[in-house]
Image: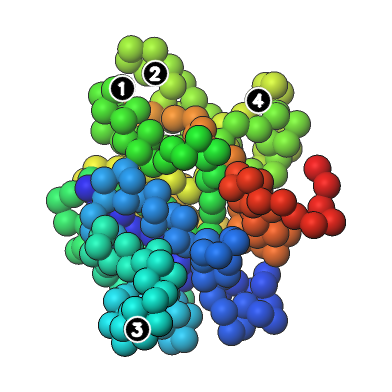
Amino acid sequence: MRAVIAAAGMGTRFFPIGRTVTKAMLPVLDRPVIAYAVADCVAAGAREIAIVTAPGEAGRQIRHYFSHDAELEAYCTARGWQDKYSSVADLHRQADFTFIEQPRDERYGTAVPAILAAEFIGDEDVFLVSGDDLLLRPDGGFDLADLAAARTGAGTPGAIAAAIVPGAQAGRFGILNPRTGPGGAQVLDTLLEKPKDYEPASAFINISRVLLPAEAIRYFEKLLPAANGEYQATDAIVAFARDHELLIHPASGQYHDCGSPVGLLAAGLAAARVQGLSIPGVTE
């Protein structure tokens, strides 16, 4: 099983700091947000991971973080700081990383990373994951591993993770509209983009985590741009779901959109609580 993590966004909502530090490398406590996505992929069995980055300095930051630095390791070892470096070194032992640059050209959108990674994916099943979303699990579990197990249990070709929100909040999200598939499983029927009037009491929202067979990538490669000019991953996923059963699996973790300063701050506070850290001056 392989994984493709999208991390090529320009992060303009984080400007001015986003001009210098790519948003996937902004910290949630002591780790960049993308490191949580990598840990989720590794726990689910992905040992080959492609990270699609922006060109230039933004991509260099990500490549440096996920590449072995023998000089820094030797420096830490000589000073008895092995524990400090081990949290980074573990990444290199657990997975092989491929870095793919996404050019800044006329083609943009959430589907582009999968298209660029088609050769990397080859004939393998693949997780497609956003590098700036976070699922926090107080129980120490991993939602991508649960997603893979749920797909196996349901016997479907693919599965998509969903968070559950009150229906009154549905207008803020892309909604995964289900239908009942063979065996009673909830599978994807359609996707409603930020519906204005949503009557059900709760909604499945898209959280940019999906497990697909290799054949699904051809749906991405055949995409035409949407009305807004973007190549949207959800369009390819919905097209795949018209021809195949795509299980909707509710995530157990607490979902955080770290693509905005407020979302990143909320994720940091939540992560501190999960780890049992006290936060001076912050009350519940």
User: Which of the two labelled residues, at mark 4 and mark 1, occupies the earlier sequence position?
Assistant: 1
C-alpha span from label 3 to label 4: 55 Å
User: Which of the two labelled residues, at mark 3 and mark 4, occupies the earlier sequence position?
Assistant: 3
For disc 3, the marked residue is 78
For disc 1, the marked residue is 154
Mark 2, Cα crowd under 10 Å, few <14 / some 14-19 / many 20+, is some
**Image check: 61 left or right of 258?**
left
Instruction: Please state which of residues 86 and 27 is positioned toward the viewer in this rendering.
Output: 86
> What residue do we see at 55% from left, 38% from top?
138
Mark 3, Cα crowd under 10 Å, few <14 / some 14-19 / many 20+, is few
Q: Amino acid at mark 4?
A: Ser
Residue 226 in the image: x percent, y percent? 50, 57
Residue 52 in the image: x percent, y percent? 37, 68
Query: Secondary structure beneath disc 1?
Result: helix
**Residue 203 seen in render:** yes
Camera-near label (3 vs 1) is: 3
